[in-house]
Image (tube, helix red, strand yellow):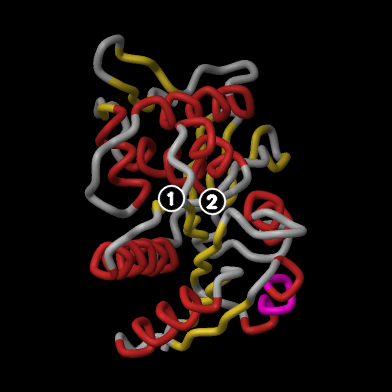
Amino acid sequence: MKKILVVDDEAGIRSLLKEFLEMENYLVYTAKNGMEAMEGLKYQPDLIILDVNMPDMDGFTVCEKIRDYVGCPILFLTARTQEQDRVNGFKSGGDDYIVKPFSMDEMLARVQAHLRREERKTSNGNVYISRDLTVDFSGHQVLLEGKDAGLTRTEFSIVELLITHSGQVFEKEHIYELVRGYEGEGDASIIAEHVRRIRQKIDKKIKHIETVWGVGYKWIG
């Protein structure tokens, strides 16, 4: 049974999500603030649903702290709709962004998609090695000249997608859908920001990701 940690300061939302997800055969733990979220990590959740607008410690800060201990998918739950808020969410280590009000069907679809993607990653034990770069797919780690490149979960997912389809051109919107694990409307600006940050981390001496102008990106190693 997959374990989900729901973090939200609104008791009604915590109760609603717990009841709904338990009906779908998930084991659900809840927390009402950042401190309780940190304590909830002892349950080793497979996925975390994290509210952004919480008192004392907002969701972005909680996410950054959580990422020091867990690598599971983190889905932000928020009423914020500005593009910069979404970018900040992904920069802090989040994997998805669900805007309130939301439908339970959409929530379930995203939860299931992210958990399926994690299962596929776990079953992939291959290692990619090319000149200065080593990618451990099962360990979710990218090494540049033997040192951890420090990629976030989403950045790793983009690299994994491009490597496993080397030479194939992916539109930004398609990358967005594939790495987010949910077939929704793509957000090209977020993918462009992720690729920019990936390049800062791994394109020190050798170019690995090529921009196909007007289309998207491809892996060239």
194 is higher (above) or lower (below) than 12? above
| Magenta highlight on residue 40 | yes
What residue sits 64% from the left and 19% below the top?
A: 204
Mark 2–mark 1 Cα distance, whole angstroms, equals: 8 Å
Q: Position of residue 70 (x, y in %)?
A: 64, 65
Residue 26 versus residue 34: which sits nearer the camera?
A: 34
Label drawn at residue 189: none
Task: Please name the residue that numbered disc 1 is placed on.
Answer: 97
SS label for mark 1: strand
Closer to us: 175 or 65: 65
Front residue of this view, candidates 205 and 13: 13
- Name the residue rendered at 43%, 40% in the picture: 81
In the rendered structure, the answer to whether residue 119 lies left or right of residue 52 reads: left
Instruction: Determine the main secondary structure of the stretch shown in magenta.
Output: helix
Quadrant of res 220? top left
For the C terminus, the image quarter is top left
In the image, residue 89 lies in the stretch drawn in magenta = no
Considering only vertical position in the picture, is 54 above or below 127? Answer: below
Q: Amino acid at mark 2?
A: Gly
The residue segment tinted magenta is 37-41
The percent coordinates of residue 27 (x first, y second) are 46, 88
Where is mark 2, residue-wise? 94
Amino acid type for the residue under numbered disc 1 = Tyr
